[in-house]
Image (cartoon, grey):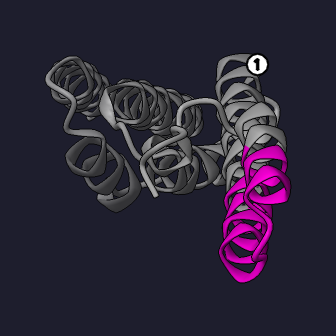
Amino acid sequence: EGGALERRVDQLLHDADSAVDAGRYDDAIAALRDFRPKHSRVMAALAQVTESERIHREREAVRQREESIAAALAAAAALSSHDEAIARLRDAQALDPNHAGVREALADRERVAAREREERRLAQERQREVDAAIARAKETSAHDIAIAILKEAQLIDPGRDDLRLGAH
């Protein structure tokens, strides 16, 4: 009877190895757990397969996280909208807050977005100043003062077509 038990154990361990090799950890664990009578080699194999499955799942989670981060980086790089890109990068950062590539891409996009917001703010401010100057020039009855006001406004925004002298 001892020889038959050892042959059953050998076959079980072989089958469990085959299941693990095929990525079927659950099958291997179930077969090892259900084996009767309890046997030291089977229990040792069960512990080993359980640990192997844990390591496999951790590696798979890391691989999937890296794939998701790579996809988010690529998607963010392809987006022209800084806000959309920043949102994608923040999602990726939630997956791995210490990922250097995500941190750098996010910092770059936030820096560019801030610079563009400031440029828009300054352009709007210039536009308000020029609009106010044009209104003052229109309100004055003295032609030379109106021209002086418009010349000052041209210095603020030389590209404005409505500031060309003679356009009024």
Compared with 85, 99 (above or below) is above
Dot 1, how many residues are within 10 Å of its Cα: few (below 14), some (14-19), or many (20+)?
few
Amino acid type, mark 1 = Ala
Compared with 51, 86 (above or below) is below
Residue 139 located within the stretch drawn in magenta:
yes
In the figure, is residue 137 to the left or right of 73? right
Residue 95 position in % (x across, y down) = 62, 48
Residue 71 position in % (x across, y down) = 34, 31
In front of the other: 165 or 134 = 165
Residue range of the region highlighted in magenta in the rendering: 125-150
Toward the bottom, the furthest residue is 139
- Residue displayed at 73% across by 67% down: 137
In front of the other: 52 or 10 = 52
In the figure, is residue 69 to the left or right of 125? left
Residue 149 position in % (x across, y down) = 82, 53
Q: Quadrant of residue 74?
A: top left
- Residue displayed at 76% across by 58% down: 146
The answer, for residue 136, to whether it is visible in the render is yes
Residue 88 position in % (x across, y down) = 48, 50
User: Circle 1 sits in a helix, a strand or a loop, which is it?
Assistant: helix
Residue 64 located within the stretch drawn in magenta:
no
Compared with 61, 14 (above or below) is above
- Residue displayed at 51% across by 27% down: 59
Q: Quadrant of the N terminus?
A: top left
In the figure, is residue 76 to the left or right of 50? left
In front of the other: 70 or 14 = 70
- Residue displayed at 17% across by 29% down: 19
Tell me the residue that label 1 is attached to.
100
The answer, for residue 45, to whether it is visible in the render is no
